């Protein structure tokens, strides 16, 4: 008999989600069915109302920004690409950090490899922290912007966005904040962070579904559109509309995903983001502390996002992840977690880490399952025959 499923990969995609989220998605897909902004008939009007509701909800979570400055692309990766490709100019210098996600690093590397920009990646420490002074030390007259992952998707550490933003602004530059691991989990008030641009997904800590993302760009900063096409407005012109949201939202929006985004944001607002985050934060801290007590286990966790990365001596992270599921039904991620540079600084460049990320519906039983399974892996010899996994104690020395 298989062990119960224990899903601990919420840093990739949150699951489960509130019933209200799936109900909103289903109603938009089954009952509305129309395209937002394309027509005056009732279903199209309702689809546009759904998009407006999602835009307003995202604006509230960003600290009450103007909804007219919130675009809703298909995801965070697209949002970051739109911001980076749309804001840099030939000859610009850009600063990224070793703790950043590939959603920012790969577009920047692409631009650098084609001679569009110069790129500097500043280091982090052994837990993924970035010293703001390191960013100041590499600033150049040609520096246009700095990108920062608000929280590392490998260790959960939250960067000092306010200090980094102050450094950028004092030098006439911009801060692009990747809030993939904080939006819906920690406050993302743009005034406090000093961000000029914020990108976030709906399907992670916000508890929405895939197919929707968020891109906020402050007033007075107008990125060139990465994608051109139909918007449902000014369709008699070949020029893209001037309005920010229309210019950034070419193509057909995923209305069910936007309905889920709005429902998820409202669900979190009703409970309070900090109150909702208390349980996964506590569980991650408990799990990290208990794993750190096991001989041969190295833990990379510092609080912030409820992420616990770890390695087990003499085991590849992929082996550990497979054994966790076989032993205890625990589903985690192993490897490099789409973060190309941070592992050099963590000392995990050979195979990455095992990452357990706790969600709003995780329990103390999930922590116990992880810890017990890791103890079994460390103290026992794993033998897999067919689909049956048994544990044998190491033979006594003679």
Image: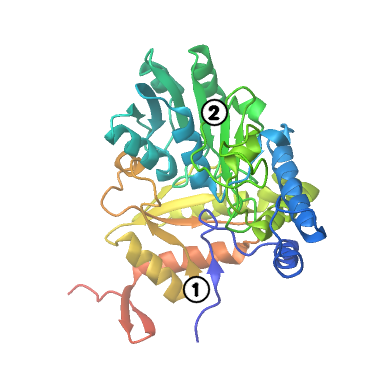
When asked about the image quadrant of residue 92, the answer is top left
Q: Residue at x 34, y 42 (%)?
A: 346
Task: Say the numbered circle drawn on residue 161.
Answer: 2
Q: Which residue is tagged 1?
A: 329
The answer to whether residue 97 is seen in the rendering is yes
Quick one: SS at disc 2? helix
177 or 186: which is nearer to us?
177
Measured in 3D between alpha carbons, the distance from the residue under mark 1 to the one under mark 2, in whole angstroms, is 37 Å
Task: Provide residue 41's location: percent of width, then percent of height.
Answer: 80, 58
Disc 1: CA contacts within 10 A as few (<14), some (14-19) or many (>=20): many
Image-based side of 197 in relation to 383, left or right: right
Identify the element where label 1 is drawn: loop
**Where does the image place residue 68, in percent across and percent down from the top left?**
70, 35
Q: Position of residue 276 (x, y in %)?
A: 71, 50
Badge 2: residue crowd in 10 Å (few <14, some 14–19, many ≥20): many
Residue that lies at the very extreme toward the right in this rendered image: 42
**Residue at 54%, 42% in the rendered image:** 303
Q: Earlier in the sequence, mark 1 or mark 2?
A: 2
* Image quadrant in which the C terminus is located: bottom left
User: Picture coordinates of residue 343 (x, y %)?
Assistant: 33, 44
């Amino acid at each position: 008999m298989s062990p119960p499923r224990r899903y601990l990969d919420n840093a990739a995609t949150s699951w489960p989600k509130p019933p209200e989220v799936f109900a909103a998605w289903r109603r938009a897909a089954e009952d509305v069915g129309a395209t937002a902004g394309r027509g005056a008939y009732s279903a199209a009007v309702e689809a546009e109302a759904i998009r407006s509701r999602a835009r307003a909800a995202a604006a509230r979570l960003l600290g009450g920004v103007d909804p007219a400055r919130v675009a809703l692309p298909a995801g965070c990766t697209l949002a970051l690409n739109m911001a980076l490709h749309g804001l840099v100019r030939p000859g610009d210098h850009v600063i990224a950090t070793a703790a950043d996600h590939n959603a920012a690093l790969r577009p920047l590397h692409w631009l650098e490899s084609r001679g569009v920009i110069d790129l500097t990646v500043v280091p982090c420490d052994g837990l993924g922290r970035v010293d703001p002074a390191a960013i100041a030390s590499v600033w150049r007259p040609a520096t246009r912007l700095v990108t920062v992952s608000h929280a590392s998707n490998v260790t959960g550490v939250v960067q000092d966005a306010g200090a980094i933003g102050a450094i950028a602004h004092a030098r006439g530059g911009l801060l692009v904040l990747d809030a993939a691991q904080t939006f819906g989990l920690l406050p993302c008030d743009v005034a406090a962070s000093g961000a000029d641009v914020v990108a976030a997904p709906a399907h992670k800590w916000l508890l929405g579904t895939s197919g929707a993302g968020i891109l906020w760009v402050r007033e007075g900063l107008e990125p060139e559109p990465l994608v051109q096409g139909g918007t449902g407005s000014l369709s008699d012109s070949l020029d893209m509309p001037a309005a920010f949201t229309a210019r950034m939202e070419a193509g057909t929006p995923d209305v069910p995903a936007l309905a889920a985004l709005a429902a998820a944001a409202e669900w979190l607002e009703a409970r309070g983001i900090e109150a909702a985050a208390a349980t996964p934060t506590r569980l991650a801290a408990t799990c990290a502390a208990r794993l750190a007590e096991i001989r041969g286990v190295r833990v990379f966790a510092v609080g912030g996002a409820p992420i616990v990365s770890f390695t087990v001596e003499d085991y590849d992270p992929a082996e550990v992840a497979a054994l966790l599921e076989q032993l205890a039904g625990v589903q985690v991620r192993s490897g490099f977690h789409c973060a190309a540079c941070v592992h050099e600084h963590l000392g995990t460049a050979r195979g990455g880490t095992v990452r357990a990320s706790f969600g709003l519906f995780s329990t103390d039983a999930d922590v116990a399952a992880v810890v017990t399974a890791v103890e079994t892996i460390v103290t026992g010899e794993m033998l897999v025959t067919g689909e049956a996994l048994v544990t044998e104690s190491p033979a006594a020395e003679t």
